[in-house]
Amino acid sequence: MKFNCTVFLVTIILLAACQNKKANPQPTPTPPTVVDITIAGLQPISNTVEVNGTVVANEFVELHAETAGKLTYLQVPEGSRIEKGTLIAKINDADLQAQLNKTNVLLSFAKKTEERNRKLLAINAINEADYETALNAVNSYKADAQYTQSLIDKTVLKAPFSGLMGLRQVSIGAYITPATVIATLQQVDKLKIDFNVPESYSRDIKKGKQVEVLLAGSNEMKKATIIAIEPQANISTRNLKVRAMLNDADGNPGGFAKVVIHANENNKGILIPTNALVANDKTNQAVLIKDGKAKFVDVKTGVRLANVVEITKGIAVGDSVVVSGVLFARPNSVVKVRKVI
């Protein structure tokens, strides 16, 4: 009885093993990944950068008096053009004029004394010390007169250059100080454009390069020529400040301008679609086809455009780069090329 039970159990185990063997067939080979590729080659790189700018007058100044006092003359033709040297304002200088007149009287008397003593010295009627005292008096009064005249000159305000007057900020008869703004004067027959560009475009921003400018309220692009670049990059933004001269001046200083820069002109490089990159934590990778298998390589990128990116290292001209099916490819796995894009 015990022997029969043992034979029965062994028979059941053998039958179960046979059934499991039939239920687990041998795995079928994995089909190759179907991909689309592109052949790497040199292509022209043209990158258009748009930044915001500000219209700047060729010359701009806030008009201040050099001294404090009451305005006795004021001529500010608002919104009109004035020429260099035009008298704009004058401060009361009656006390300084009186001081100058007094000094001139004393100077005249000192000159006569010096002349008389010079004649007496020539015949040894006086000693040399008396003559030098008279001469020093003349020189002292001359210096006083020059000093008073300089103070009088500071009461007069003239246009430092030809330009367009702004709005008048004071009225005649007002007491003003050097901190008081009388008006502004701007030279608008020439206009500049100030704008900032990322430091990465420094090689494309050169003195003499032309950019395109679109002024507020205008639909026409105008040309501007870069005339200066600030050597110091902004520490906070790492941007470079650039100034360009507008070839056809027609705008308002302080107004908005859109600046279009054509970077990387006449340059060539290897461009691949952006979706061909495989990003990881440290580097970017691309998938190449070598001997019918997928090979992952580290790449360095350059300029990024709308749908493509420049590859500066990792891909050579003539390489087959996977552009479709990248996510399904595995290192050293067999791939099948469906088409070349």
Image (spheres, grey):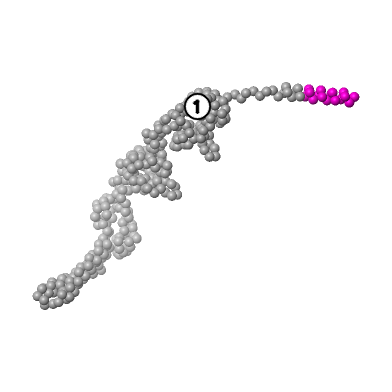
Count of labels in the image: 1
Q: Position of residue 92 (x, y in %)?
A: 27, 65
Is 273 displayed left or right of 98 in the figure? right
Residue 79 can be seen, yes or no: no
Magenta segment, prevailing SS (helix, strand or loop): helix
Q: Quadrant of the N terminus?
A: top right
- In the picture of the structure, the residue carrying the numbered disc 1 is 37
Quadrant in which residue 336 is drawn: top right
Q: Residue at x 38, y 46 (%)?
A: 241
Residue drawn 87% across the image and 23% down it: 4
Which residue of the protein is positioned furthest toward the right in this rendering? 1
Give residue 332's quadrant in the image. Answer: top right
Above/below status of 292 relative to 222: above
Q: Position of residue 97 (x, y in %)?
A: 23, 67
Mark 1, other Cα within 10 Å: few <14 / some 14–19 / many ≥20: many
Q: Is residue 8 left or right of residue 295?
A: right
Q: Is residue 144 above or below residue 158?
A: below
Would you say 263 lies left or right of 21 here?
A: left
Rendered image quadrant of residue 155: bottom left
- Helix, strand or loop for disc 1: strand
Residue visible at 28% across and 50% down in the picture: 163
Q: Looking at this rendering, what residue extends furthest in the left direction? A: 123
Q: Camera-side residue: 259 or 228?
A: 228
Residue 115: percent from the left, percent from the top?
13, 72
Rendered view: 87 above or below 340: below
Q: Is residue 143 magenta?
A: no
Residue 295 visible to the viewer: yes
Extent of the magenta region: 1-16
